[in-house]
Image: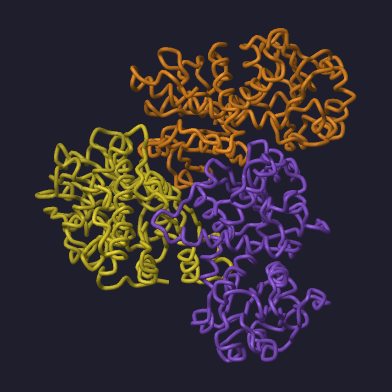
Chain colours: A purple, B orange, C yellow
Amino acid sequence: MTLAPPPSSRVQLTDDGKLRHFLSVEHLSRSLLEDMLDTAASFVDVGGRAIKKVPLLRGKTVVNLFFESSTRTRSTFELAAKRLSADVLNLDISKSATSKGETLLDTLRNLEAMAADMFVVRHQDSGAPFFIANEVTPGVAVINAGDGRHAHPTQAMLDMYTIRHYKGGFDGLRVAIVGDVLHSRVARSQIHALNILGAEEVRLIGPRTLLPVAAESLGVTVFNDMAQGLRDVDVVIMLRLQKERMDSAFLPSEAEFFRLYGLNNEKLRHAKPDAIVMHPGPINRGVEIASEVADGPRSVILNQVTFGIAVRMAVMSMAISGQESSQNPEQGEDHGR
Amino acid sequence: MTLAPPPSSRVQLTDDGKLRHFLSVEHLSRSLLEDMLDTAASFVDVGGRAIKKVPLLRGKTVVNLFFESSTRTRSTFELAAKRLSADVLNLDISKSATSKGETLLDTLRNLEAMAADMFVVRHQDSGAPFFIANEVTPGVAVINAGDGRHAHPTQAMLDMYTIRHYKGGFDGLRVAIVGDVLHSRVARSQIHALNILGAEEVRLIGPRTLLPVAAESLGVTVFNDMAQGLRDVDVVIMLRLQKERMDSAFLPSEAEFFRLYGLNNEKLRHAKPDAIVMHPGPINRGVEIASEVADGPRSVILNQVTFGIAVRMAVMSMAISGQESSQNPEQGEDHGR
Amino acid sequence: MTLAPPPSSRVQLTDDGKLRHFLSVEHLSRSLLEDMLDTAASFVDVGGRAIKKVPLLRGKTVVNLFFESSTRTRSTFELAAKRLSADVLNLDISKSATSKGETLLDTLRNLEAMAADMFVVRHQDSGAPFFIANEVTPGVAVINAGDGRHAHPTQAMLDMYTIRHYKGGFDGLRVAIVGDVLHSRVARSQIHALNILGAEEVRLIGPRTLLPVAAESLGVTVFNDMAQGLRDVDVVIMLRLQKERMDSAFLPSEAEFFRLYGLNNEKLRHAKPDAIVMHPGPINRGVEIASEVADGPRSVILNQVTFGIAVRMAVMSMAISGQESSQNPEQGEDHGR
């Protein structure tokens, strides 16, 4: 099943342009994305405090609604919600109610009736979080934690936070996204975010079989050669290579992929001397990235994880605030900054 | 294994008649059930507040002790406990300690030794929560979250809350319970509650194979025909039809069941014009209930879920309060209203 | 895989001798262990209060990192952490990230990047928590919740707490540890703790096949006969017999084991009249211990569980305090007493 996302992302915003769901970075404004990064900045230091908690979502109920299991992603949202003082309910839907034959909508309606304030949705089908956001009761926020091949917007925004943190901004930046772009929801979200935030050039590097057809229409430059593609870039984003692609016709072999597209120090020499290396994790050492790079001085992979908690706290508090302001138009001006 | 429930429910009450366990509505007084509904009413608005939390059970440990999995029921108790500020420990016992060969009693004793204050028990065997309540240390409350075919008292009380909310009370009410009454712990608890609270007439409607023998001894009227059974009722409670009954000799076919006993608008016409339609969920659309009814104006199915959180908060706080008052007889007069 | 523990336990302590990890009782000083027991004493009454919560770890993130499942042990650490007001993240690693091919170190680095403050580690490999403690970022505490056949130090310390509680101290005490010592991480930790705390004599009792070779080098006396071994002891610690040993060459049969080494009232008569009986749980009734003893007046098995929560609270608060004092040398003098 594929639920086509709607042509516009209007569902994400309140009438006065505030975030109320976060489903995709596509169609969002530069100022909103920058607002999100600024809000996240205010949460970064919370993780370094002795008491890592702020009361912004106290008494709110956040439901992690995972139709596709992901311990890592679920953990980051769970920690972000708990540090905002929310109550968290983890539902691994693949193993529960729907197995009793209940429809997705009935599951949603029931959770709404329990007075949930937010659904963090991960789903194997592209567009599922849009479908849910269109259906939920006013007042309930939906956050996309990864849907099919479509989007993974909080991952893209933590990547943007990381780039801005190390590069100061996006003007004049050249960013290369390397590897299995075709199957990557992360790459799709990154491309939109980089274009909206004004990066100079976004490059996709990979074998033809792992790049989308007509990729140029996304506003990117395409390379099949690492040396050419990495030349003078400021940021290298490596994508995770799904092991299951190995068995298919997409790839000759793991070793061959690493030889051609795996990032090692030698290939990294083509990038700018101060280029940073990023990866959404979990990394496959020796497949898409060599340990010398992953653990080297240019890698900011673990910093991405740290910023990821702050970005998720920002998204959650902004969406709750947006929902509240559209419920009670006179209230809800600030979202926790 | 079937652990026969004791002849009396005396174990549920303190010496001065307060609730200390909630195992079954049977043998409880009308005033106690009304007290429970009144207490729930005070919690209904908590779910609508910006901060959905009251400190009544702060520092208490609630253990969800589920010998039979049920994500939905466990979630409602977990949310109710968290909104009362309790710490919650979820134990899916079918997958844990007892698999190491520990007895049920040893598991209980260990949890008591960890200073648990409440066990929310779901068990495939009728009577198991009674057995546990008879064995627990004084001070520890036991709530029945469904045992075998015996009882599901919090579900019955949320149904009573819903009926009282929409009908103002029980005097003169005619209530029909439709479907697989034979295998339903929910129905059994509803019949007791409705009789105690003074409903005018309780009707059971279903095929002979799915009604208990000598059902009339329960204080009900029995019908095998929907048109006759629904005539002039104020409330229609549809029961979930367990798919596993389909394969057995109990039922000809799903389609045949729906034709005879599935609730659609046409059959609903026999009830009073202002009759409400209830269902404990999850619903089987097109099996026991048509979507036109489930999603229609008479359906209060989702309101039941909302009231369910409040009723569980009420039961939990009353039982903790009852336990405390019998531990320290001079204290514990109020239970959070 | 076996990761050999380092020769010294220096990694456990700060430069000025405070606990910062708790991996093994071996090599720790008597005064530190006594300090731990004293700290636990201050937490014992928390479990008896109406509000079982202290704010010592508020805003801290405790990650239960269980590579080997254990609902019981996980529950005790989860409750201890929650009663210290920490946020808890439960990760059953056998089922998650590492299954995506991520290395143990990458999993750790990611959790650190999420600003975890403590890892409670259970692992099937001896030495794994030492490996982790040597690798973690300064500021993150590691607690060993059982590693291979090596150690289970919090279990040993709750046993010491129990002995001190009932016997007033360790001077002149004779303690017998009975059963499958060879495969028991608990026994190994108990022997170290008893020797450090100055017990007069530690005896191991069991069949030759279930005792370590050269056991005497551990500072114990070895017996193969219960009557002789139990003579005049003050404390009898029964070990759990792993069912899986039954199928091996180690044991003739369950019945034969019980006849020779199972503790019943008759055998217990050889111990001192006021001897206490302990067991780490879960017990196998009729295998290593008769119900008449387990439920009898000398059994303190359930008291061990109660003290276990307090001891885990003590260890957690001491380790966090030690980490904080080595991060900020001028602060962190007290650890919650």
Give left or right: position of A326 versus C195.
right
Report the residue that reaches farthest toward the front.
Answer: A330
In the image, C248 versus B217, the foreground residue is B217
Count of numbered circles on the image? 0
Q: Residue furthest left?
A: C172
Q: Quadrant of the N terminus of chain B?
A: top right
Q: Residue at x 75, y 64 (%)?
A: A26
Q: Please determine whether, in this image, residue A225 is positioned above or below residue B247.
A: below
Image height of C248 relative to C238, above or below: below
* Horizontal relation, residue A125 to residue B153: left or right: right
Residue drawn at point x = 37 percent, y = 58 percent = C146
Residue A230 picture location, percent across and down: 66, 87
Where residue B116 sits: x, y (%)?
Answer: 41, 36
User: Quick one: C295 or A15, which is closer to the camera?
Assistant: A15
Residue C256 screen position, x and y as percent:
33, 48
Is residue C321 among the parts visible in the rendering?
Answer: yes
* B251 up-or-down from A166: above or below: above
Between A79 and B13, the one nearer to me in the picture: A79
Q: In the rendered image of this protein, does residue A217 appear above or below residue A16? A: below
Q: Nearer the viewer, residue C108 or A138?
A: A138
Q: Is residue A1 visible?
A: no
Identify the residue shown where x is 54% and y is 16%: B35
Q: Residue furthest right?
A: B266
Residue A79 x/y as whole percent:
52, 55
